[in-house]
Image: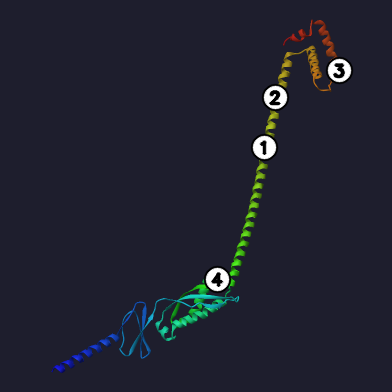
Amino acid sequence: MESSNVVFIVIIAVVVIVVAALAASAVKIVQQGYAGVITRFGRFKRETGPGLALITPFLDRLVRVDMRETPRTGDRQDVITRDNVAVAVNATIFSQVIEPRAALFNVSDYFIAIDQQARTTLRNAFGNVSLDEALSQREKINASMQQQMEQVTDKWGIRINRIEIVDIAPPAQILQAMALQKQADQEKRARILQSEGQQQSAVNIADGNRQAAIKNAEGEKQSAILRAEGNRQAAILEAEGRAQAIQTVYGSIKQAQPDPTLVAILQLDTLSKFAASDNTTIVVPAETAGLLGAAQALRSVLAQAPSLEAVVETPPAGS
């Protein structure tokens, strides 16, 4: 009786173990970011997403495929540019599986396939550009490589999100030649900038001198105009003063009604002032008869008057 119980317990334990094993093999877990591909006897059956996946034990098989973006940095390799310069290049490829079925069944190992395709594409891309273009147009080379690789990887169910060239290392001789060329270009640019600065400075100085000459000419013109205007006003005022003086003198003489004797005395007084001057030439009026008549009249006056001073001091009638 006891032996039969032991056998029964053993059988139950075996059954439980078998059921647990079958349950464990039938229930699978797919992590987030992965996709499951279920095959039966090696043939594709269906796809499953993240979470629990139920399969038939001993008949089905679940293969997990990483659906996340995966960066792959390739090994450094030597490539030849269009101008026959050997450079060492390294690039990183960011790829992502978008069709798990195609990634498993259209290519034996898509990791190796992407790596080999990247090597070939990298050689082709750098073989179509010169060294200067490779160093200055990395974005263009990245886009060209991505386009070429997508034409191949689309049938594998893999998308190339982007390609980044990590490093481009030309030979040491090329780097030294590039450094000398860069130095020469900088010196050339410095001389050009210096000459342009000197040219601009000369132009500015010439413009300043021209503006100064224009301002000076305008100032001299304005000064001459003002000077001429002042001279004209002075001449007008002087002429008006002379006219007023002559008019005043003439009015005074006319009002005094001088006689010939006084006129003769004034003429002789004027001649005496001419004789007392430092001039060596004395201008004598052409009307000598009038002077002689004036002298004769003066002689008769002197004969009648006790002295010349009395005659001069006595004012004429009506003065």
Above or below, comparing residue 287 to residue 16 in the picture: above
183 above or below 294?
below
Q: CA distance from mark 3 to mark 4?
A: 117 Å
Q: Amino acid at mark 4?
A: Leu
Q: Which residue is mark 4?
A: 135
Q: Residues within 10 Å of mark 4 (few under 14, many from 20)?
A: some
State how far apart marks 2 and 4 are (Cα): 95 Å
> Residue at the location (71% across, 21% down)?
245
First-in-chain label (2 vs 4): 4
Q: Amino acid at mark 3?
A: Thr
Q: Is residue 316 visible?
A: no
Q: Position of residue 73 (x, y in %)?
A: 46, 76
Quadrant of the snapshot with the N terminus = bottom left
Image vertical order of residue 150 relative to residue 6, above or below = above
Q: Earlier in the sequence, mark 3 or mark 2?
A: 2
Q: Amino acid at mark 1?
A: Ser
Identify residue for label 3. 288
Q: Earlier in the sequence, mark 4 or mark 1?
A: 4
Q: Which quadrant of the structure image shows residue 263?
A: top right
> Can you tell which of label 2 and label 4 is closer to the viewer?
4
Per the model, the C-alpha gap separating discs 3 and 2 is 33 Å
How crowded pointer 3 is (Cα within 10 Å; few <14, some 14-19, many 20+) is rated as few
Amino acid type for the residue under numbered disc 2: Gly
- The residue tagged 1 is 223
Q: Earlier in the sequence, mark 3 or mark 4?
A: 4
Residue 191 place in picture, x, y as percent: 63, 59
- To which residue does mark 2 refer? 241
- Tell me if 26 is positioned left or right of 1 in this view: right
Q: Is residue 291 left or right of residue 63?
A: right
Residue 22's quadrant in the figure? bottom left
Measure the C-alpha gap from mark 1 to mark 3: 51 Å
Q: In what quadrant of the picture does the C terminus appear?
A: top right
